[in-house]
Amino acid sequence: MTSPPGPQKMPMQNVANRIVRGLLATPGLHRVVSGRLITLYLVGRKSGRRYTLPVAYSRVDSSLLIGTPFAWSRNLHSGGRVELRLQGSRRTADVEAFTDEADVVAHYAMLCRDNPQFAKFNEIELDAHGNPSETDLRTAWRAGARSFRLTPH
């Protein structure tokens, strides 16, 4: 049995991330992208490496829902805190991490319905009504997708 493909960076992703991080940090200009993106500021638990990452989010009540298949997400864990920039303001947020299939698939489905660009980036097909493919959602989970609820302070 072949394992599902792992996450892959898009060509020029580092350049795109640098531009988006700049937009998110610039007063006034952040409004162009901050309705869909936040900046996360992470420090690697083992490496001590600093990460500054633009990440798609959806609002769920007073929390933010994010999802990613990338290894940097291992630095987020339930009960921890993360620093983020949300709509131009830097703040901290409590983290709740999800790794089990049912939660991740449900969260990814929500993120895909709310943000078709999230679906496209994660190679999840949407039907004519904007509903994500169940097969693609489960494939994303098998490839390492995780989801997180961030509750900003």
Image (cartoon, rainbow, N blue to C red):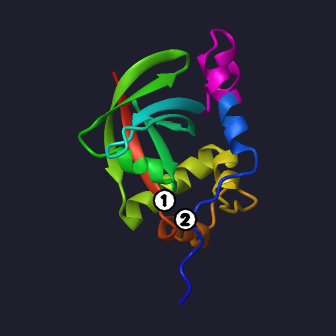
Q: Position of residue 4 (x, y in %)?
A: 56, 75
* Dominant secondary structure (helix, strand or loop) of the stretch shown in magenta: helix
Taking depth in this image into account, of 19 and 147 the one nearest to the observer is: 19
Identify residue for label 2.
140
Kind of residue indicated by mark 1: Ala
Magenta highlight range: 19-36
Q: Position of residue 76 (x, y in %)?
A: 36, 44
Q: Cα distance, mark 1 to mark 2?
A: 6 Å
The residue lying at 65 percent from left, 61 percent from top is 124
SS of the residue at dot 1? loop
Disc on res. 8: none
Was residue 25 drawn as part of the magenta stretch in this picture? yes
Q: Quadrant of residue 48?
A: top left
Give yes or no for contact between labels 1 and 2 (Cβ–Cβ under 8 Å).
Answer: yes
Kind of residue indicated by mark 2: Ala
The residue lying at 27 percent from left, 38 percent from top is 80
Residue 150 located left or right of residue 118: left
Q: Quadrant of residue 146?
A: bottom left
The residue most toward the bottom is 1
Q: Position of residue 123 (x, y in %)?
A: 67, 61
Q: Pointer 1: residues within 10 angstroms few (<14), some, or many (20+)?
A: many
Q: Is residue 140 above or below residue 80?
A: below
Q: Pointer 2: residues within 10 angstroms few (<14), some, or many (20+)?
A: many
Identify residue for label 1.
145
- The answer to which of marks 1 and 2 sits earlier in the sequence is 2
